[in-house]
Image (cartoon, helix red, strand yellow):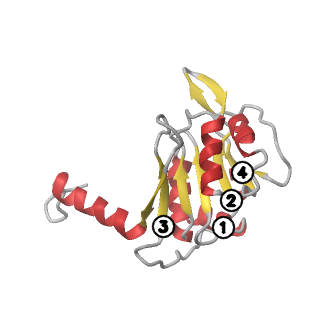
Amino acid sequence: VSQAANALAALGLTAGDRVAIYMPMVPEAIVAMLACARLGAMHSVVFAGFSASALRARVEDAEAKLVITTDGQYRRGKAASLKDAVDEAVSDQPSVEHVLVVRRTGIDVTWTQGRDLWWHDTVDVASTEHTPEAFDSEQPLFLLYTSGTTGKPKGIVHTSGGYLTQAAYTHYNVFDLKPETDVY
């Protein structure tokens, strides 16, 4: 997470910037979310099964500065491109400065010099030392969009304090996890 945060900071991300994460279920998706939180950059996870136009609507609305994706994902055991959808979604999007790509499937992808970067060339070489920023509880943490099935997707901003307080409350009272008695 520290390496990813350093890499994102080196790309110019600062508190208040927005990042679209369009990835399948891979560990780098979680790393990307936590790295954004360390910088105060708001992330928006977009379901990797959504179309390029659905991704475009969310990138445009959020004015995302960075899109993090994979070269592809596996669908029914076969590699399917995600990068092509990202290329279509970010074409003519002035806010997007970089597309950070995790090599997942190894399929060939189109490349835009100066915009597209490989995760392993960017994150894996960053320093492992990172001190997270301190933020007020009302600092935006992530942007979650509705599905858009009934019209234009609507984005809901979740703040650091509000989201984390609700998560802690739920674990304690709903899941009945108690640090004194439960091992987890």
Marks 2 and 3, Cα distance to the nearest angstrom? 16 Å
Q: Are marks 1 and 3 in contact (CB under 8 Å)?
A: no
Q: How busy is the neighbourhood of tag 3: few (under 14 within 10 Å), some, or many (20 plus)? A: many
- Give the labeled residue for mark 1: 13
The residue wearing badge 3 is 140
Question: Where is residue 60 shown, x and y percent of the image?
Answer: 65, 51
Q: Of helix, strand and loop, which one carries label 3? A: strand
Say which amino acid is labelled 1. Answer: Leu
Query: In the image as oriented, which residue stretches furthest toward the front?
Result: 151
3D distance between C-alphas at marks 4 and 2: 9 Å
| Disc with the residue nearer the chain's start (1 vs 3) | 1
Horizontal side of 21 relative to 108 (left or right) equals: left
Kindly state the secondary structure of the residue where label 1 is placed: loop
Q: Which residue is mark 4?
A: 99
Please tell me which residue is depicted at 36% across the width and 62% down the height of the picture.
Answer: 163
Question: Residues at badges 2 and 1 in contact (C-beta under 8 Å)?
Answer: yes
Q: Are marks 3 and 4 in contact (CB under 8 Å)?
A: no
As displayed, is residue 11 above or below residue 109? below
Dot 2 amino acid type: Lys
Which secondary structure lies at badge 4?
strand
Q: Pick whichever, 50 or 179, lies toward us.
A: 50
